[in-house]
Amino acid sequence: MFQPGKGRVQISEAQIAERIRALGAAIRQDYAGQEPHLVCVLNGAFIFMADLVRAIDLPLTLDFLAVSSYGNAEKSSGEVELIKDLRLPIAGRQVIIVEDIVDTGITLNYLLRLLEARQPASLRVAALLSKPSRRQVEVPIHYLGFEIEDAFVYGYGLDRAQRDRNLPFITSQ
Ligand code: XMP
Ligand code: MG
């Protein structure tokens, strides 16, 4: 597992691309002969989703949902609200949730319960980033890009007060 140096998080465009190629290959292997259904958690995961699906050499379908975020604050309120639901049913599907970052785990825990209740054939998680030191709820991450220390990061889909989502790299300063 690639871990950026202490003190500051800086993950380059090339490092992200390399990890996503590996995640895509792993998903292709695990779902060979099947048709996974990828669920992007808006807004933060939109760029990761776009790159990840193109790295998976399999027939697949996809959909989007949105949950309440931190707004412009950097800390979770601990409450999650579904703002936009999926368009497609997931019963019987091989579902992979695509998240930008798992921090306390509260959002992902909420999503796992929500989607599990719809009886997918299987339910897994792909997350670009994880801050394990911040975890309050244990959640599974089957496909993880990078483990990072506890720093607020932005870029590559993640925002800093709604800005900087278009940076092609991830940074904490
Ligand atoms: P929890 O705590 O529920 O948080 O695991 C997950 C969501 O919180 C947001 N988040 C961040 N957003 N930089 C961001 O831009 C960060 O460092 C960060 N940490 C958490 C994010 O929306 C994630 O889905
Ligand atoms: Mg998010």
Image (cartoon, grey):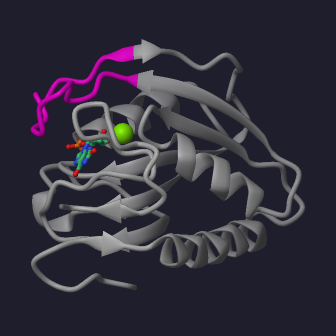
- Residue 79 lies in the magenta-colored region: yes
Residue occupying the point 38% across, 85% down: 2
Tell me the quarter of the picture where residue 8 sits.
Answer: bottom left
* Residue 146 percent location from the top left of the image: 38, 72
Residue nearest the viewer, comparing 37 with 64: 64
* Residue shown at 32% from the left, 36% from the top: 163
Residue 150 in the image: state x and y as whole percent: 12, 64
Q: Is residue 115 above or below residue 131?
A: above
Quarter of the N terminus within the rendering: bottom left
Q: Is residue 173 magenta?
A: no
Left or right? Give the position of 166 relative to 173.
right
Whole-percent x and y of residue 70? 20, 29
Q: How many marks?
A: 0
Residue at position x 20%, y 66% from top?
A: 132
Identify the image quadrant of residue 32.
Answer: bottom right
* 39 left or right of 44 in image: right
- The answer to whether residue 117 shows anywhere in this view is no
Magenta segment boundaries in residue numbering: 67-82
Q: Is residue 84 above or below residue 44?
A: above
The residue at 43%/63% (across/down) is 169
Prevalent SS, magenta region: loop
- Where residue 161 appears, as percent x and y from the top left, is 22, 32
* Between 134 and 33, the one nearer to me in the picture: 134
- Quadrant location of the C terminus in the rendered image: bottom left
Vertical placement of 73 versus 50: above or below? above
Q: Quadrant of ligand 1?
A: top left
Is the residue 71 above or below the residue 94 in the image? above
Q: Does residue 141 appear in this view?
A: yes
